[in-house]
Amino acid sequence: MDDFLAGFAELFARFDVLGAFWVNIQLTFWAALLSLVLGTVLALMRISPIASLRWAGTAYVTIFRNTPLTIILTFTYLVLFSQLALSLSDTLDTTFFWFAVIGLAVYHAAFVCEAIRSGVNTVPVGQAEAARAIGLSFLPAAALVIFPQAFRGAVAPLGNTLIALLKNSTVAAAASVSTETSSLMRTMIEFRPDLMVAIFLTFALGYVILVIPIGLVTTSLSRRLAVKR
Amino acid sequence: MRKHTMGLLAMAAASALALSACSGAEVGEPTGEDTAAGGGETIRIGIKYDQPGLGLQEGDEFTGFDTDVARYVAEKLGYSEDQIEFVETISANRETALQNGDVDMIFATYSITDERKALIDFAGPYFVAGQDLLVAADNTDITGPEDLEGKNLCSVTGSTSAENIKNDYAEGVQLVERPGYADCATALASGAVDAVTTDDIILAGLAATEENAGKFKVVGAPFSEERYGVGLPDGSTDRCEEVNTAIAEMIEDGTWEELVASNTEGADYTPNADLNPPEQDACE
Amino acid sequence: MSASVLFDAQGPRGRALSVVGNIVATVAVLAGLVWLASVLYAKGQFSASLWQNAVSAEAWQSYYLPGLQNTLRSALFATVGSVLFGILFGIGRLSQIRPVRWVSGVVVEFFRAVPVLLMMIFFYMFFSAQAQWIADRPFAAVVVALVLYNGSVIAELVRSGVGNLPKGQGEAGLAVGLTPAQTLRSIQLPQALVAMLPAMVSQLVVVLKDSALGQFILYSELLRSAQILSSREQNPLQALVVVAIVFIIINWLLTVVAHRLARLLSSRTAGATVEGTGIGNPTAVAGGPVGGGPGPGAGGAVV
């Protein structure tokens, strides 16, 4: 038992587990921000009066929701880096970090869009009719009447998307981000295969600790923010 | 909490295991387990599937220097071509594959090291490679690993040569790790990375593929010695002797030279003549 | 399509504006694509041989189709396994016995929180070290990881499916003298399962997409096969495009099936059919309120 603890302590001294989680949290934070913006725009497009925008929004969601995230993140390497040679920073590590953020955001924006649309579904027809009756055109009606209520109704599915995004940030390894948790877990297991179960449980519990509060907060928020009808 | 989860995990894993065990039996591996029982009917040889010029799966065919050497050795051991069954072994699982009996021999750019010798046996070496650099054909400013300061360098995940360069030659090199060499080669072709690193013969194979012909060159300043051995399960002294005899014969009768030439054709590559063809180590 | 309540039918000026807007947007998108194409062209990525080798009969025969077969095989086993796992633990969460309920809850919450990729890598390394009798360890690791995650999601679907049935269903069962367990088994569960069938089909999309994570442990599924193809032909970009299109088509078809199924089955259950996050009517507001639907856990096709 002492050997076990000593081995474990050594492992933690040698590998920066918290640092790896910090990378995943940062990936999640920026991708969440970006995908919220992109997803809101897409949701607006999908309910807009202009047919081509509706069509484009639908096409976007259909394509990106049905592509494995691994493939999207591999594309960020093969296209953005390898072919377009875009550089977002002086160091490659940082550049790959932002490519991964872009890939994650592009994928999850499709789900954010659907979450917001489900929120729009919770807004009674009468609200939209009232908005039109007082003379609001599409954009003001959406911005002042529909979306504020829709976001409140979309808190729960948005929370689910955020949880999925946090877990999916491990796939950033496909975009050459080598400092995140799945890569580190693999390295640690290769280094101390005898402790593999303990190593896995450490990482797993790390995610449980991160995910459960998000779930609790969004559930309580969705109750508190729900529009009483 | 912790203890409980572990128990639950074990429970879930056990039920899942039982499930996958059923599936394993039902689907069956085409690569069956009859080898051990069949008394040497076929021989299972571990190779790489994704290294042009060394071990490459081309539909049902397998090509490359490693596979050619494997065929030659297997023939000397009394196995005809259709008794050979090639299995994919990747760098990370080679020792395990031998220990588990998944394969009988491994020819997969497998460098002889003391660490590995503690776990398995090696016959050979049959080739001595060196870690080197691949650059664009018209590149003149990279002549060795020291020139990589501030440059972008691509290697495959788990390769030691990029680490070696960063630690010993150019601290400021920027590393890109990809799952396969093709990802590195396209980035090199477009100029997104300045060099690709791994063993020189692997680089030569990469440069010699149809699509890359004429685009790249191997720098030719190897900074390590990689002695490729034949991986054998621990305690295979007799088999090791047989394999060594076969390799010596292959070098003797000129086949070795032919195979090196045919598999690196079009890459402007000659193996380090001081070390090649190598003398085989004594079996332990 | 019925007119949306969000905006009036457009007049002549609105229509003219729309046309201009459409043209401007199309031109902008096309310009972006042309720029991308010109860069890729300059880098030689439109070389005929690269694309020919990515779509040749041999590429399909020797790489994509065997890879697709493995992808589908892992998805099939994972789906069957997750449904069994999900029903088992879903019932567990509804059990009258407190410890069973508690244990099922912990299992489900645990495996819903752990990233599938971590599980896949762990089980692959675990099987390689401890369970060498498994012949195809990458396959086993992919399936086990997918079963544990998706099974937990389905367990939540089962629970919310039963929870969403009208109260009268359970009360009626008890009133005719069935025990709570019998009521669950013969009245609530069958209806809940029908209600969640479309969501399960949506979940299949998740399983298929996640099976592509198998490339990290070198399971020779579609993506990994494309990698091997591209190490021979040196065309990773082109091969990846082909694989992406295959995935999109299969998953899109599954989404359509889920959508149809939801409509078809809505008469077969007292609960509301859930179809995960399906593709709905573009003018969603016209559908009116759908409040009080399934719990947050039912959001199928995320991940």
Image (cartoon, rainbow, N blue to C red):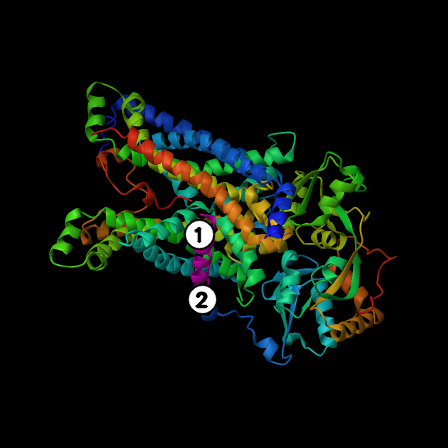
Residue A105 x %, y %: 47, 35
Amino acid bearing label 1: His
Secondary element under disc 1, as helix, strand or loop, is helix
Q: Residue A163 magenta-drawn?
A: no
Residue at (59, 42) in percent of width and height:
A176
Q: Which mark is residue C71?
A: none
**Looking at this view, is A174 or C292 the one in front?**
C292
- Most extreme residue toward the front is A2
Residue B257 x %, y %: 81, 64
Residue linked to disc 1: B4
Is B164 situated left or right of B20 in this image? right
Q: Residue B17 magenta-drawn?
A: yes
Residue at (62, 38) in percent of width and height:
C42
Residue B116 x %, y %: 72, 60
Q: Which mark is residue B23?
A: 2
| Among numbered discs 2 and 1, the one appearing first in the sequence | 1
Amino acid bearing label 2: Ser
Q: Residues within 10 Å of mark 1 (few under 14, many from 20)?
A: few
Residue B210 x %, y %: 67, 54
Q: Is residue C212 visible?
A: yes
Is residue C3 shown above or below B144? above
Secondary element under disc 2, as helix, strand or loop, is helix
**Looking at this view, is C146 or A60 the one in front?**
C146
Tag nearer the camera, 2 or 1? 1
Q: Which residues are magenta?
A: B1-20
